Amino acid sequence: MESNMKMFHATKYVGATVLAIGIAIFLYGVFVSEYSTMMGIGIGTVMGAVFTFLIGMFLVASEEMIANSRKCKKESA
């Protein structure tokens, strides 16, 4: 359980940091930059942050389910 919480917190902090950077790049592209390329980079960064967060949550949930199924098998045997 402790390693799952460490992975959960790491995923949360990395996802939030990359999301904030992506939003900042997007806003820079919309309001400051004359090039629309910055908007695309910002959108891609935000999508990457969401993808990273979802994959991290999937890994935490699958590890928890595997640990619980092993624990249940030991109790029933």
Image: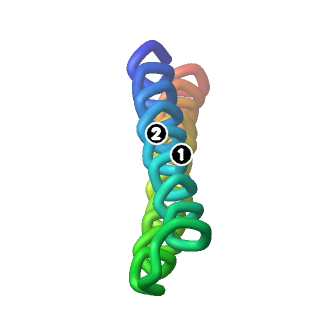
How does the figure colour the protein chain or chains? rainbow
Q: How many marks?
A: 2
Name the residue type under label 1.
Ala
Name the residue type under label 2.
Thr
Quick check: marks 1 and 2 in contact, CB under 8 Å? yes
Label 1 crowd (10 A; few <14 / some 14-19 / many >=20): some
Q: Nearer the viewer, residue 39 or 48?
A: 39
Query: Residue at (46%, 81%) from the top-left corner?
Result: 34
Label 2 element class: helix
Percent of width and height locating residue 21? 45, 49
Q: Is residue 72 left or right of residue 2?
A: right
Dot 2 corresponds to which residue? 17
Query: Residue at (47%, 31%) from the top-left corner?
Result: 13
Residue 55 appears anywhere in the view? no
Q: Is residue 68 above or below residue 59?
A: above
Dot 1 corresponds to which residue? 20
Instruction: Report, in whole angstroms, how far the alpha carbon at label 1 lies from the one at label 2.
Output: 5 Å
Residue 67 appears anywhere in the view? yes
Percent of width and height locating residue 46? 53, 63
**Farthest residue, direction bottom:** 36
